[in-house]
Amino acid sequence: MRNVNRRMFLGASASALALGTAGLTTGTPSDSTADALAQFQFGARNTGHLDASPPEKYLAHDWDTGTYWGVFGTPAVVDGTIYVAMTEGNYGPGSGYAQALDAETGESQWTTDLAGKSETAPAVGDGTVYFGDKTAVHALATADGSVEWTFEKGATASPALVDGTLYVSAYDGVYALDAADGSVEWKQTDGYEGPTVDYGKSVASAPAVADGLVYVCNRDGTVLALDAASGDVQWRDSVEGMSAPTVADGTVYVGSGTVKALDAETGTVRWQRGYQDPEAGDAQSPNQSVAVHDGVVYSSANQVDAGSTRVLFAFDAETGEKRWKSVAPLGTFSGTPVVSGGHVYVWAETLVVLDTEDGSLVGQFASTRTSNGTGVVPTDDALYFGLSAYDVEGVGGGVHRLVADESAWNAPPKVELEASSTSVETGDSVTLSATGYLNQDEERYHDHDQEGVEYTWLDWNFEGDWEYVERDRTEEDGLPGITGEVELRNGDAGTYEMSVTIEDRSGWTASDSVTVEVGGGNDENGDNDGDENDDC
């Protein structure tokens, strides 16, 4: 049993995602040109899209590895096996180990010590898994974790594996390595100043590889296009930040500071969205790598006029026009979005799921708050991610698996119904009062503004023939969320069930009911003498 230390791993994953160190990996990359089975953002083009039908609603915890070691690089899930780097320490070279886990049960298959701290996603192909850490790049056999070769340069971001070549961003430049033996095919040092003593900062992003070119951002905010065969610089352009480039349909997209779209062949700027850009519709600044799928660019961003990083934008990939924006349900969006099954998966102090069509909230993780998750790996029956910190509320580091489990959502919003009287006479009125609450017993997220819960409706249901004296009076101003009243009168004696149902914009409902007894003591005039005339 490996000894672990119950120390806090502070949330470094958000910055790691921007640089491509906390990558998104799984067994069926959307980039068909890559021969890697798994690597950063689901393929060498770094699109962040995966063809799968993952769970999207009632997300609940299935298992975790039960470790206090942090995970900074997104696990790779290939052929029923998870490959992940476990790390100890926030700063300096640190220490860590590579591990293979059974994807269904989380049981360990093998572990191999690494030379230092790893913040990168592994790449997997042809029976080998490649890990980069602060001191070296390691090629391990997927079968047993044995070391095949080691390249003695610290990796600053996740490697890209294409056609037998491993492209690595290191502290002193970009390397192309023979994936079979680790020998250097070429090295490009343009824009680099050599090894850095500040291990907490990366000097380059994860490479993106497409159509014979390698794209990378160096640490001075320059995106470079390199010849994949020789490493020669083909073009360069200045961008704000160092997020990993994404390549789709002949365009390179770079986030951080702005979203910038460049012609993949020439580097010509096609469009750019940044601070106070009127065409984007809001003053905003992206802070992570982007995801691109089906003509849409997804970017988590800082809405400047709101004073906090809490908006996810969808831009038209060709024109840069805003399709929609989604405000984080609570807290802030962090990390690179993942697109799969018609949904966007992104962290907002817990994992939330948005509809790709309009950004509406579809589902979320039934969890205590934790915003230090890596990128999400979607499969048809589960979601996988790593946590870089041990949460004080009980969510640990290590690898976590989520599944759809409606039983875990046993207390969505709440509603309480009261009657002014549960026993009245015919012709007397009764007032029903309903109050809807966000579930405050469990920290779960529902679509709401900064003041309270927004509900789609408050739906009354009454047995019998009731006449409205005053119809629904409903208010939605702040917590507890929603209140409503109706005043009713019934001329028929009997026992009636009165109920109310609320539904929040996440689609979860709650109901409550009361029973009202109507006696026959009063006639239609409201007295009890049985005649049709008022008594004077």
Image (spheres, helix red, strand yellow):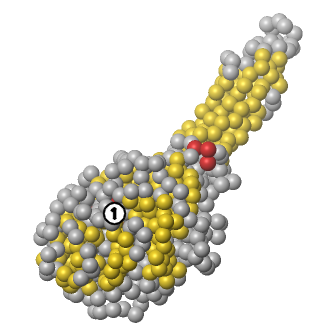
Q: Is residue 95 above or below residue 521?
A: below
Query: Residue at left 40%, top 64%?
Result: 76
Give 181 or 157, whichever is nearer the viewer.
Answer: 181
Where residue 346 appears, as percent x and y from the top left, is 44, 59
Amino acid under disc 1 = Ala
Q: Quadrant of residue 199?
A: bottom left
**Residue extending furthest top?**
531
Above or below, comparing residue 29 to residue 227 in the picture: above
Residue 361: percent from the left, percent from the top?
47, 49
Q: Position of residue 324 (x, y in %)?
A: 36, 53
Q: Please identify the quadrant where the N terminus is shown.
A: bottom right
Task: Name the residue located 43 percent from the left edge and 56 percent from the top edge.
Answer: 80
Q: Is residue 470 visible?
A: yes
- In the rendered structure, the answer to whether residue 440 lies left or right of residue 133 reads right
Q: Which image quadrant is residue 45 in?
A: bottom left
Question: Which percent across, then down, holds residue 239?
Answer: 26, 76
Of 249 and 534, nearer the camera is 249
Q: Left or right: 533 with respect to 24?
A: right
Q: For mark 1, does the 10 Å Cα neighbourhood hold few (<14), some (14 to 19), or many (20 or more) residues? A: many
- Above or below residue 139? Residue 374 is above
What residue is disc 1 on?
38
